[in-house]
Image: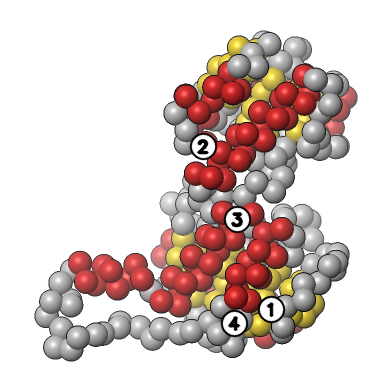
Amino acid sequence: MNMIVLDAKTMGFPESEWEEVRALGNLRLHDVTPYDAPAIAERIADAEVVLTNKVPLPAEVIAGAGRLRLISVLATGYNIVDLESARERGVTVCNVPGYGAESVAQHTIALLLELRNHVARHNASVQAGDWIVSDTFSYWQVPLHELRGQTMGIVGFGDIGRRVGAIAHAFGMRILAAARTRRDAPDWKDFAWAETDEIFESADVVSLHCPATPETIGLVNAGRLARMQGHAQLINTARGNLVVEEDLAEALRSGRPAAAGLDVLQHEPMDPACPLRSAPNCIITPHMAWATVESRRRLLQATVENIRGFLDGRAVNVVEA
């Protein structure tokens, strides 16, 4: 069975980490594949199983892959696959839900702590020699603020949002959560459900953990940003298109919100003209919240199980058109 990985480099593993996949068939690894339909079609022309993280599989590519039986997405999101075309041709599509909740939650809190304690900024100051010439034993370049007693507003309360809430609650924060479906409210002290607009108006920190849907794309826009408190901070480790980047850049220049920590952008890799690149008080990391070693290994192991299950006639993690 011919198996093709279109963008193995995104997983960051040496070839030896792919041995369990290789044991299931004839595996070919491509570090990167251009996002170009003819190039993709050529690579998967004789493939029965295709693994992709971000390389798209539109209808015309799927239609040209006559032997294709399984697409296993190396991620939770599967919007890169034309599901209708796959269904029409009897191609099973699987994804890997839930593998990265711990990793993304940890990175969310890392961004929050950086916004509150400015560790990188002060390390750079020390390395530049500022502490050597200081006339006091301690200094700080900007005010540092505690989390206890602050309100964390979480938009999207699935596995990741709940884990972020649990960590923030452990810091002594109050939690407000907005969710499309309100279920199983945690028994934390100072937890409450809220509407999204209420969260933007009252939270000290707003953290996004919802999927990109027609209802949520552009969720963070000039109107909602204007509702935020002047000292509030925005964190996005979900999807870049939840945020209207021009509006956020302008809001940061006006000082409302006070700061933002982002791991995702509308265009990835970053567009050189991205308005947030030069925005003040804006921390950006390169879509790495999902990518702890442990998380990537869970993802790869789940992909092995996706392929095994399909071959055994018991496909798992199947997504429907």
Q: Position of residue 193 (x, y in %)?
A: 79, 77
Above or below — where is 269 with respect to 1? Answer: below
The residue nearer to you, when weighing 61 against 300, is 300
Amino acid, disc 2? Thr
**First of labels 2, 1 by sequence position:** 2
Specify whether residue 151 is in view: yes
Foreground label between 2 and 3: 3
**First of labels 2, 3 by sequence position:** 2
Q: How far apart are marks 2 and 3 (CA)?
A: 19 Å
Query: Residue at point 81% right, 28% down?
Result: 315
Amino acid, disc 1? Ile
The 10 Å Cα crowd at callout 3, few under 14, some 14 to 19, many 20 or more, is some
Q: How far apart are marks 3 and 1 (CA)?
A: 18 Å
Q: Which mark is residue 102?
A: 3
Look at the numbered disc 1 and give the secondary structure of its residue.
strand
**First of labels 4, 3 by sequence position:** 3
The residue nearer to you, when weighing 114 against 302, is 302
Q: Position of residue 174 (x, y in %)?
A: 66, 82
Which residue is disc 4 drawn over? 172
Amino acid, disc 4? Gly
Where is the C terminus found, in terms of image quarters? top right
Which residue is disc 1 drawn over? 175
Which residue is disc 2 drawn over? 10
Q: Position of residue 104 (x, y in %)?
A: 58, 56
**First of labels 3, 1 by sequence position:** 3
Foreground label between 2 and 1: 1
The residue nearer to you, when weighing 170 against 193, is 170
